[in-house]
Image: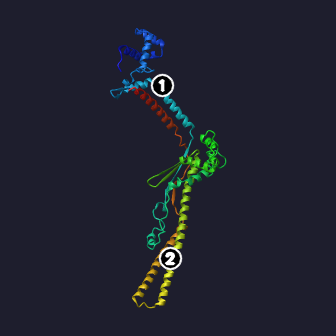
């Protein structure tokens, strides 16, 4: 921007004496020093402000100072920051205070964790019938397959487990008697400052369900979702972390989860073993009937035809013998399956190893007050500096 000699003179005076912008006495003194009247100096400064050559803080030729030939002038940027250091300090302080306030009022959580490891049949692909499946399928028995597998993270993330955790009554330091998480978190208490609650009261629909146990349970489960985290390593180790407002409560919930997983898998495996036993017993009875019937057919044939003198009779006798052999093989196979199924139904399988049980935490896990304070301080610094840079570059 090209300036007249007189405008350049006023600009040089302002650079040397920026205090004349707000101090009329100083402006009068400086005007006399440069053989000008105070009114003339004041009017010229006002004209330069109108044209955007100087700002209210006395900075001049912004675009020429910050950007020189398409490159940022680091010295000019440092000067801008120096001239606005109080603004930077003020914004950074506000952000820091907000961070400290949040860190002080935020709910304190303590963390406990358990580590689980699949063991036994849970970590194997084959089931109890693995050795005999091929032979059984040879004779048309297709219902014998691998035992079901269970994914531990899916069990922990299930609504069934979390509903049990929410409705389970826990010992807490906040109440003298055992309470469930709905009461502990005070989800069942009315919240007068909640706009959603006021809206539900005004609407005619769902009013009957607004205070139902199902609604409270659902809200508690949503909150519990944010407090349980699962990490699964490539080695198969599963770590479950639980956050709660009390250290002992966090440990109790984590240990309850490990017990639930063990009992659930054990129950499902036992039920599957019982189902398989019932199926094998049924198939064994059928196989025995078929074998008996095939033997009876052979006996009746031999009574009618003691000597197989023709080729047709010899062929018919061979078919009867083959039928007996096939039914006998199926029956023997199923007898072996039956014994295995009885053993499997009776034994207790170790399906999940609990490597680490949860213990009460000695230090809080959240909020990380130092980190929050430093982060908000850094965020305030970046916000103030970024604002100043954008403001200075807007005139380019």
x and y percent of residue 182 in the render? 62, 48
Q: Are marks 2 and 1 in contact (CB under 8 Å)?
A: no
Report the coloring of the rendering. rainbow
| Quadrant of the frame with the C terminus | top left
| Mark 2 secondary-structure assignment | helix
Where is mark 1, residue-wise? Answer: 86
- Mark 2 or mark 1, which is nearer to you? 2
| Quadrant of the frame with the N terminus | top left
Where is mark 2, residue-wise? Answer: 287
Task: Compare residues 157 and 4 and report the one nearer the observer.
Answer: 4
> Quick one: label 2, few (<14), some, or many (20+) residues within 10 Å?
many
85 up-or-down from 20: above or below: below
> Quick one: label 1, few (<14), some, or many (20+) residues within 10 Å?
few
Residue drawn at point x = 51 percent, y = 29 percent: 93
**Residue extending furthest front?**
204
> Of label 2 and label 1, which has the lower sequence position?
1
96 up-or-down from 25: above or below: below
Residue drawn at point x = 49 percent, y = 84 percent: 297
Left/right of residue 186 with respect to residue 156 in the rendered view = right
322 up-or-down from 394: above or below: below
x and y percent of residue 246 in the render? 59, 45
Left/right of residue 159 with respect to residue 1 in the rendered view = right
x and y percent of residue 122 in the render? 49, 60
């Amino acid at each position: 921007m090209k300036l007249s000699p007189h405008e350049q003179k006023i600009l040089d005076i302002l650079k040397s004496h920026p205090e004349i912008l707000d101090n009329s006495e100083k402006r009068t003194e400086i005007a006399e020093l440069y053989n000008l009247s105070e009114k003339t100096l004041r009017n010229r400064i006002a004209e330069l402000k109108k044209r955007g050559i100087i700002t209210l803080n006395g900075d001049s030729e912004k675009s020429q100072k910050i950007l020189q030939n398409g490159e940022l002038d680091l010295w000019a940027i440092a000067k801008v920051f120096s001239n606005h250091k109080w603004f930077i300090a003020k914004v950074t302080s506000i952000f820091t205070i907000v961070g400290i306030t949040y860190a002080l009022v935020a709910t304190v959580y303590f963390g406990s964790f358990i580590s689980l490891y699949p063991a036994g049949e849970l970590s194997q692909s084959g089931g109890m019938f693995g050795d005999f499946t091929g032979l059984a399928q040879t004779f048309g028995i297709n219902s014998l397959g691998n035992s079901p597998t269970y994914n531990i993270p899916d069990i922990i993330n299930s609504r069934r487990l979390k509903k049990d955790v929410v409705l389970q009554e826990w010992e807490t330091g906040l109440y003298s008697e055992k309470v469930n998480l709905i009461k502990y978190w005070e989800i069942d208490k009315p919240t007068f400052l909640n706009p959603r609650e006021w809206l539900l009261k005004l609407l005619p629909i769902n009013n009957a369900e607004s205070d139902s146990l199902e609604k409270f349970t659902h809200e508690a489960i949503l909150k519990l979702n944010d407090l349980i985290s699962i990490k699964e390593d490539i080695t198969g180790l599963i770590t479950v972390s639980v956050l709660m407002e009390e250290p002992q409560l966090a440990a109790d919930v984590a240990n309850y989860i490990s017990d639930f997983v063990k009992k659930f898998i054990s129950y499902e495996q036992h039920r599957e073993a019982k189902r398989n036993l019932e199926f094998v017993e049924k198939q064994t009875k059928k196989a025995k009937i078929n074998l008996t019937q095939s033997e009876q057919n052979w006996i009746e044939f031999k009574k009618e035809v003691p000597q197989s003198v023709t080729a047709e009779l010899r062929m018919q006798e061979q078919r009867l013998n083959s039928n007996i052999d096939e039914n006998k093989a199926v029956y023997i196979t199923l007898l072996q399956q039956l014994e295995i199924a009885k053993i499997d139904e009776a034994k207790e399988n170790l399906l999940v190893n609990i490597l680490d049980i949860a213990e009460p935490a000695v230090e809080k896990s959240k909020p990380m007050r130092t980190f929050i304070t430093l982060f908000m301080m850094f965020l305030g610094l970046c916000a103030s500096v970024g604002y100043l840079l954008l403001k200075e570059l807007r005139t380019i």
